[in-house]
Image (spheres, helix red, strand yellow):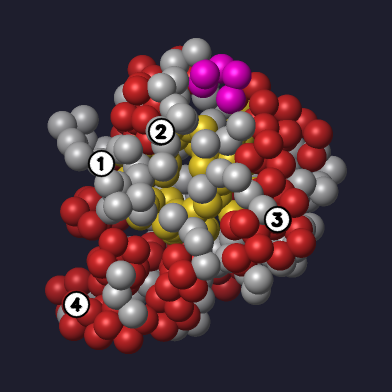
Amino acid sequence: MFEYMGWGKRNRIRQIVAADDRCLMLAIDHGYFMGPTHGMEIPAKAIQPLLPHIDSLMLSPGILTSSVDEKLRGIGWVLRASGGNSVLEPDIDNEGLILSAKQAVRLNASAIAVSIYAGAEHQHQTFLNLAKAIEDAAEYDLPVLGVTAVGKKLKDKKEKRYLALASRIAAEYGADIVKTYYCDGFEEVVAKCPAPIVVAGGPRLDTYKDVLELTYRAIQEGAIGVDMGRNVWQSEYPAAILQGVRAIIHGNATVKEAMELVESLSTEETRRKELFEVTQEDIAVSSIH
Ligand code: R5P
């Protein structure tokens, strides 16, 4: 799949995309603009039990150094390299670069992630962020994940035409993998994007079946995997749902088979304990994109 890349880049990308050309990335970078997000309030505690089930983590540099054991092996990490805004602003697209490729390599990153906000007020600047990051990363053969972000004003734009445009632009700039949302007609988004696509989970869905169906359809329609966060962290049984998602991605399980697995793994022992009071405002904030 990545034969055209140099050895260093291929080796790094293989820390996040497994030998079956599929990828299960667990996103815990939400805090870079949302602060201590529901379910991810204490990252070290949240991450630890899930490590055996994932290929890679997507996270910000400060969460890597504070919350991930440096002795950890066998897992890749994708570092968030764009940022500079927060949910306290009217929108979140006014981003710059917050991490250089050199810093990322020093942290042994497998890749960096940069968001673009097509059609938003700061679209131009975010496209140039991606271009700059790709140029910078090329120095080190470091892969770049282009993230098609939507922010507050564009949050209803999770449809085929928009996502195909944003994904294609990220690929045209040279993103090695594109992260976007699943939508009706997703096959077309995949077909029109020359780079492999991973799907974000988005805000928490109502049921586990919804999460598994999203994963199943995304894979069937051409995604190489998911980069999922809130549907794991905010679920009642994070390790169980994650293993269900994994069964679809790496085990070719059907939704029914994955659901049976999730149910069998949902026990008192694997239940997530709510550590803090969660208000309606917390829920609303964590659903803005
Ligand atoms: C923004 O918060 C990040 O880029 C997330 O990594 C991305 O949205 C994936 O996480 P989720 O499945 O929660 O949407």
The nearer-to-camera label among 2 and 4 is 2
| Amino acid bearing label 1 | Ile
Query: Which residue, given by chain and number where applicable, does mark 4 sit on?
Result: 265
Q: Is residue 170 above or below residue 148?
A: above
Mark 2 → mark 1, Cα distance in angstroms: 21 Å
Query: Which residue, given by chain and number where applicable, does mark 2 sit on?
Result: 3
Q: Residues within 10 Å of mark 4 (few under 14, many from 20)?
A: some
| Amino acid bearing label 2 | Glu
* Residue 268 sits in quarter: bottom left
Q: Quick one: label 1 or label 4, which is nearer the N terminus? A: 1
| Amino acid bearing label 3 | Ala
Q: Residue at x 30, y 47 (%)?
A: 18
Q: Residues within 10 Å of mark 2 (few under 14, many from 20)?
A: few
The nearer-to-camera label among 2 and 1 is 2
Mark 1 → mark 3, Cα distance in angstroms: 30 Å
The nearer-to-camera label among 3 and 2 is 2
Query: Which residue, given by chain and number where applicable, does mark 1 sit on?
Result: 75
Query: Which residue, given by chain and number where applicable, does mark 3 sit on?
Result: 164
